[in-house]
Image (cartoon, grey):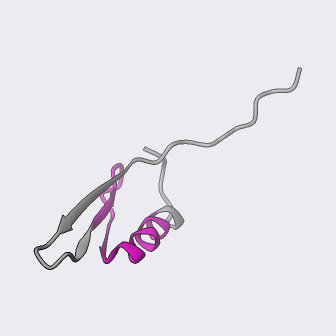
């Protein structure tokens, strides 16, 4: 029997969103274990904020 594939560790991200009266979305994505934070402005930049945190070295949380 083959050993199971190592899927790596989970990373916990905390997303804090703000939706203002004008309908704009902004917020912060935080990597739970390290406390590293990336701000974003607009839904289209949320994915880039997540990608930035996942591309930095750090342990899974």
Give me the residue at 47% from left, 56% from top.
Answer: 58
Q: Is residue 46 magenta?
A: yes
Q: Quadrant of residue 26?
A: bottom left
Q: Residue furthest right?
A: 1
Q: Is residue 44 left or right of residue 25?
A: right
16 in magenta: no
Taking depth in this image into account, of 22 and 42 the one nearest to the observer is 22
Which sits in the foreground, 47 or 36? Answer: 47
**Is residue 7 placed above or below 49 in the rendered structure?**
above
Quarter of the figure with residue 49: bottom left
Going by the image, does 19 lie left or right of 31? left
Q: Nearer the viewer, residue 43 or 48?
A: 43
For the C terminus, the quadrant is top left
Q: Return the x and y of residue 4 as percentages of the image width and height.
A: 76, 29
User: What is the x, y in percent for residue 22?
Assistant: 14, 79
Q: Identify whether 12 is placed above or below 38.
A: above
Considering every residue shown, the one lying at the far top of the view is: 1
Judged left or right of residue 23, residue 34 is right
Q: Is 45 above or below relative to 17?
A: below
Task: Name the spot of residue 18 as percent of width and height, x first.
Answer: 18, 66
Number of labelled discs? 0
Viewed as shown, does residue 54 lie left or right of 49? Answer: right
| Residue drawn 10% across the image and 74% down it | 21
Residue 1 in the image, given as x and y percentages of width and height: 89, 20
Name the residue at 25% across, 72% down. 25
Start and end of the magenta stretch?
28-53
């Amino acid at each position: 029997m083959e050993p199971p594939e190592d899927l790596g560790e989970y990373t916990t991200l905390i997303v804090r969103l703000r939706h203002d009266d004008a309908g704009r979305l902004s917020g912060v994505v935080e990597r739970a274990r390290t406390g590293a934070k990336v701000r974003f402005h607009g839904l289209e930049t949320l994915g880039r904020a997540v990608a930035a945190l996942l591309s930095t070295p750090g342990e899974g949380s």
